[in-house]
Image (cartoon, rainbow, N blue to C red):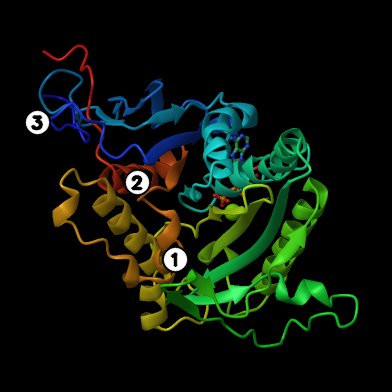
């Protein structure tokens, strides 16, 4: 077979755990000189392919010696023409339905630096990504749902960052920002994640801000982002090496029924997935360089364990990293998780793109429904 069928599992027609979805978003090639150097294409709405277009000298342009084309299958593939609207409609609408019925949800953007993670999650002002749209939609929905005076919704937000396996509060400084502007030299204090049987997972002394409309919610997130940028000027800090985690909590109080429903929505712009060496992590020791990708590899292991068909035998290794500890109650189980694999399509990024797709298919193996043109 000429196909590296990464998703094949002939034993069952189950698509695995539907609470975890893995999707791909291909970033359009911007530089005109790279237009003819495409390494990866969307074949259909669930397949990406590395076409066999190796025309380098030495590769026979015939049957033998030809490098095989490789394809990967996922829950959905957003091609280079996909818009922010497309991604929102497909990823967020259903997730918000779940969020409002009390399910925890997580959306994660994974990929090398420059592949479009922040574009997908935050987006530019004139072409907003998932987070700003979700912020406004939450309050749109509350407006529509609050027909009865007995039903009350409370929305709150926290914004955390994980860098070198330490958790930082991005909203802490914003509260008394006007009073004392942050000094960039100031050492940041890290926070501790607790796992309690009564309260679930919580981060000790993380700032939680209650907000009453979409603009206010987005304003808090922008303040948090600015804290992140400031830190990136710190010589010991690279923002592409940190995970940015927005947590939105929805509390619905039904005073007539006397019931309370709570759910968390995590929106995560992950650290760049490219390998770090000791030398390109500024000032990092070898131990630190190892830590940088720990949360990412643990995330892959957790998603993999969650999507194993025989769930009883599978231990879910949540405790292996700070990211997976933090997301424990919002990955798998009754939670809805979407992992978006962001990929750059040009040849110069081919190796990293392949690594990203392999991460995704290791995380969730999806059956190849119909293999066409297999001879
Ligand atoms: P990352 O956060 O993964 O490092 P960015 O989101 O910052 O990458 O994207 C890198 C650059 O590519 C930015 O200039 C961004 O505007 C642009 N970009 C990313 N995705 C798209 C897209 N789907 N369409 C157009 N431009 C994009
Ligand atoms: Mg980014």
Callout 1 touching callout 2 (CB < 8 Å) = no
Picture quarter with ligand 2: bottom right
Ligand 1 within 8 Å, label 3 CB:
no
Residue linked to disc 2: 351
Q: Residues within 10 Å of mark 1 (few under 14, many from 20)?
A: many
Residue linked to disc 1: 323
Between the C-alphas of marks 3 and 2, the distance is 31 Å
Name the foreground residue: 243 vs 320. 320
Q: Tell me the mark number nearer the camera, choosing from 3 and 2.
A: 3
Name the foreground residue: 332 vs 252. 252
The mark tally for this picture is 3
Residue 56 falls left or right of residue 24: left
Q: Which mark is residue 11?
A: 3
The percent position of residue 172, horizontal first and vertical second, equals 72, 75
Helix, strand or loop at label 1? It is helix
Which of pointers 1 and 2 lies earlier in the amino acid sequence? Answer: 1
Between the C-alphas of marks 1 and 2, the distance is 25 Å
The percent position of residue 237, horizontal first and vertical second, equals 58, 75
Considering every residue shown, the one lying at the far right of the view is: 178
- Residue 28 visible here: no
Callout 3 touching callout 2 (CB < 8 Å) = no
């Amino acid at each position: 077979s000429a196909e590296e069928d990464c998703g094949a599992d002939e034993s069952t027609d189950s698509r695995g755990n539907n609470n975890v979805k893995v999707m791909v978003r291909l970033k359009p090639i911007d530089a005109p000189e790279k237009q003819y150097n495409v390494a990866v294409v969307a074949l259909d709405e669930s397949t990406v392919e590395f076409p066999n277009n190796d025309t380098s000298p030495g590769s026979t342009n015939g049957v033998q010696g030809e490098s095989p084309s490789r394809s990967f299958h996922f829950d959905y593939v957003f091609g280079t023409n996909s818009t922010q609207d497309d991604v929102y409609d497909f990823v967020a609408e259903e997730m918000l339905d779940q969020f409002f019925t009390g399910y925890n949800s997580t959306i994660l953007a994974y990929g090398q630096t420059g592949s479009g993670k922040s574009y997908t999650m935050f987006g530019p002002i004139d072409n907003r990504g998932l987070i700003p749209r979700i912020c406004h939609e939450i309050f749109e929905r509350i407006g529509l749902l609050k027909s009865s005076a007995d039903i009350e919704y409370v929305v709150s937000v926290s914004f955390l960052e994980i860098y070198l396996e330490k958790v930082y509060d991005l909203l802490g400084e914003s509260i008394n920002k006007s009073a004392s502007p942050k000094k960039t030299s100031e050492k940041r204090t890290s926070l501790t994640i607790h796992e309690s049987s009564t309260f679930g997972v919580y981060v000790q002394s993380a700032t939680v801000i209650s907000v009453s409309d979409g603009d206010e919610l987005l304003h808090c997130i922008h303040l948090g982002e600015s804290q992140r940028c400031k830190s990136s000027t710190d010589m010991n800090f690279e923002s592409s090496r940190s995970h940015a985690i927005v947590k939105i909590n929805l509390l619905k109080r039904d005073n007539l029924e006397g019931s309370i429903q709570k759910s968390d929505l995590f929106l995560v712009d992950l650290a760049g997935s490219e390998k770090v060496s000791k030398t390109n992590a500024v000032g990092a020791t070898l131990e630190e360089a190892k830590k940088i990708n720990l949360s990412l590899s643990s995330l892959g292991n957790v998603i993999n364990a969650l999507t194993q068909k025989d769930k009883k035998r599978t231990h879910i290794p949540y405790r292996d990293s700070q990211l997976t500890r933090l997301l424990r109650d919002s990955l798998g189980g009754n939670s809805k998780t979407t992992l978006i694999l962001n990929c750059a399509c040009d040849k110069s990024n081919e190796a990293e793109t392949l690594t990203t797709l392999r991460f995704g298919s290791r995380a969730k193996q999806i059956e190849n429904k119909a293999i066409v043109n297999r001879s």
